[in-house]
């Protein structure tokens, strides 16, 4: 059995307003994502979002009914795409150590373009923090399943996949804290790269 087939499939946590985005809406969502990642989102008004993306308030409201919902759509889309990228990378390698590092490498690469302001806004705004928590839960579940499968096939020595998953979850939550990142003088990408190496060589 292909190990990648046991990896839980990330699903969009926010309900889709439309089954299919139009070409214009996709371009708008991409522009909003770039804006949010660079500058954060809590300080932006709908009017400012429209101006900065060269669109209109009316166009923004075809994507979501309010600023709050629009923020959640953009943030959910970003983390959902990260999850899909992670699964794709993990599916291309067989060794469990490489698979885990490949899975986490999606976070390393996609966090390279994230500003500290975006991270702080995600953590300090309760709806986006809860959204991020749920995406992290899915990612940790995927890692736990990889480890469980490797133990079942004898690739890893027997142990508790659930315990390892709890350790991974606790460490990632700690490394999400903007104050911790500022204290150690590292970016989110830097710490995820170090953590991926630790997982590859240490935990598993």
Image (cartoon, rainbow, N blue to C red):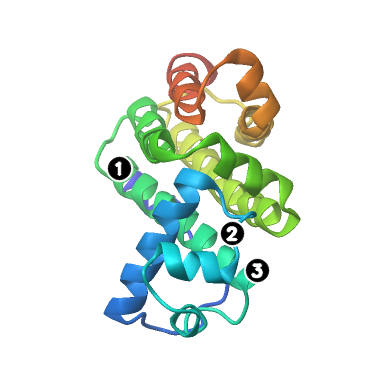
Of badges 3 and 2, nearer the viewer stands 2
Residue at x 53%, y 58% (from the top left corner): 75
Sooner in the amino-acid sequence: mark 2 or mark 1: 2
The residue carrying mark 1 is: 89
3D distance between C-alphas at marks 2 and 1: 34 Å
| Label 1 CA crowd tier, 10 Å (few <14, some 14–19, many 20+) | many
Check disc 3: other Cα within 10 Å, few if <14, some if 14-19, many if 20+. Answer: some
Between tags 2 and 1, which lies in front? 2
What separation in Å lies between label 3 and label 2 (alpha carbons)? 11 Å
Q: Is residue 45 above or below residue 33?
A: below
Residue 142 in the image: state x and y as whole percent.
50, 46
- The residue beneath circle 2 is 44
Q: Nearer the viewer, residue 109 or 36?
A: 36
> Looking at the image, which residue is at 44% across and 37% down?
111
**Residue 115 is at least partly visible in this image:** yes
Image quarter for residue 127?
A: bottom right
Query: How many labels sit on residues?
Result: 3
Determine which of the numbered discs, if any, sits on residue 68 in the image: 3
Q: Is residue 9 visible?
A: no
Q: Nearer the viewer, mark 1 or mark 3?
A: 3
């Amino acid at each position: 059995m292909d190990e990648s087939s046991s990896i839980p499939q990330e699903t969009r946590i926010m309900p889709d307003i439309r089954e299919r985005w139009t070409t214009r809406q996709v371009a708008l969502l991409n522009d909003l994502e770039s804006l949010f990642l660079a500058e954060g989102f809590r300080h932006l008004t709908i009017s400012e979002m429209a101006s900065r993306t060269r669109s209109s308030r009316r166009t923004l409201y075809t994507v979501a009914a309010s600023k709050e919902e629009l923020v959640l759509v953009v943030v959910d889309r970003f983390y959902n795409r990260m999850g899909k990228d992670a699964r794709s990378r993990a599916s291309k390698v067989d060794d469990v150590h490489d698979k885990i590092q490949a899975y986490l490498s999606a976070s390393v690469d996609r966090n390279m373009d994230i500003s500290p302001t975006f991270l702080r806004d995600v953590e300090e705004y309760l709806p986006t923090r809860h959204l991020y928590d749920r995406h992290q839960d899915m990612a940790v579940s995927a890692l736990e399943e990889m480890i469980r499968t490797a133990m079942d096939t004898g690739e890893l020595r027997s142990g508790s996949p659930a315990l390892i998953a709890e350790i991974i979850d606790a460490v990632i939550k700690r490394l999400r804290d903007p104050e911790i990142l500022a204290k150690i003088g590292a970016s989110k990408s830097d710490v995820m790269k170090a953590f991926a190496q630790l997982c590859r060589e240490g935990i598993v």
